[in-house]
Image: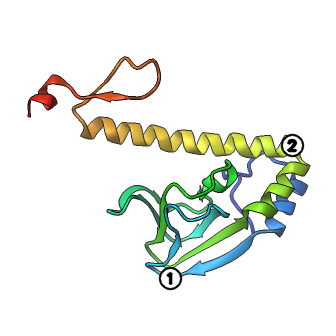
Amino acid sequence: MYLKQKDIFWDMNKDFVKKIMDIAATTSHKEGEWLFREGDPADSFYILLKGRVKLSLGETGHIVYIVNNAGEAFGWSSLIGRESFSASAECMTPTKVLNWDKDKLQKVLEKDPVNSLLLYRCLAELLGSRLLKSYTIIASLSPAEISPSYGTGQVMASPETEAE
């Protein structure tokens, strides 16, 4: 399976990428099928090949991100030591993904720390980009002001909001 160079495996050794791809499974899913739900064991990592996947939070299913570009990674909770997924992933259209078993992938990563570091840097860049998009959306919707919280990210309601 070929992924574009801009994707998560950019700049990594070809042998390393081959080892990772050798343990990947390609799976197809129907519209409306859940890949995982918030709170499920974080046992897989995914890359979208085709389709659209809605990532949502909570019982109301508040959409936090739409995975719709081939090569986009999600299910990253499995790579950062989380026991469970922090969001739910539902296929919005017929979808095809690459997925990796967390334990098998971890074994490959442990054998090549240099390329593993590159993978985690790419993952951090991806997550950072999504976080910045979230900040932009939140800032445009909320009249709240950011409190001087010394980096904790706490939000303090503005006086106009408190009066309502």
Residue 87's tag is none
Marks 1 and 2, how far apart at CA: 37 Å
Q: Which residue is mark 1?
A: 30
Label 1 environment density (alpha carbons within 10 Å; few <14, some 14–19, many ≥20) = some
For the residues labelled 1 and 2, say whether their Cβ atoms are less than 8 Å apart. Answer: no
The colouring scheme, among rainbow, by chain, secondary structure or one colour, is rainbow
In the foreground, 53 or 157: 157
Give SS at disc 1. loop
1 or 2: tag closer to the N-terminus:
1
Residue placed most toward the observer, 72 or 42: 42
**Front-lying residue, 139 or 147:** 147
Amino acid bearing label 2:
Pro
Instruction: Residue 156: give x, y in percent of width and height.
Output: 28, 26
Residue under the image location 41 percent in, 42 percent down: 134
For residue 160, side relative to residue 1 (left or right):
left
Q: Position of residue 117 (x, y in %)?
A: 78, 40
Residue denoted by label 2? 113
Compared with 87, 126 (above or below) is: above
The quarter of the image holding the N terminus is bottom right
User: Can you give x and y, in whole percent of width and height, for residue 15 in the image?
Assistant: 90, 56
How many residues crowd mark 2 within 10 Å: few (<14), some (14–19), many (20+)? few
Q: Residue at x 65, y 46 (%)?
A: 123
Residue that appears at 65% across and 78% down? 27
**Please, what secondary structure does the residue beneath circle 2 have?**
helix
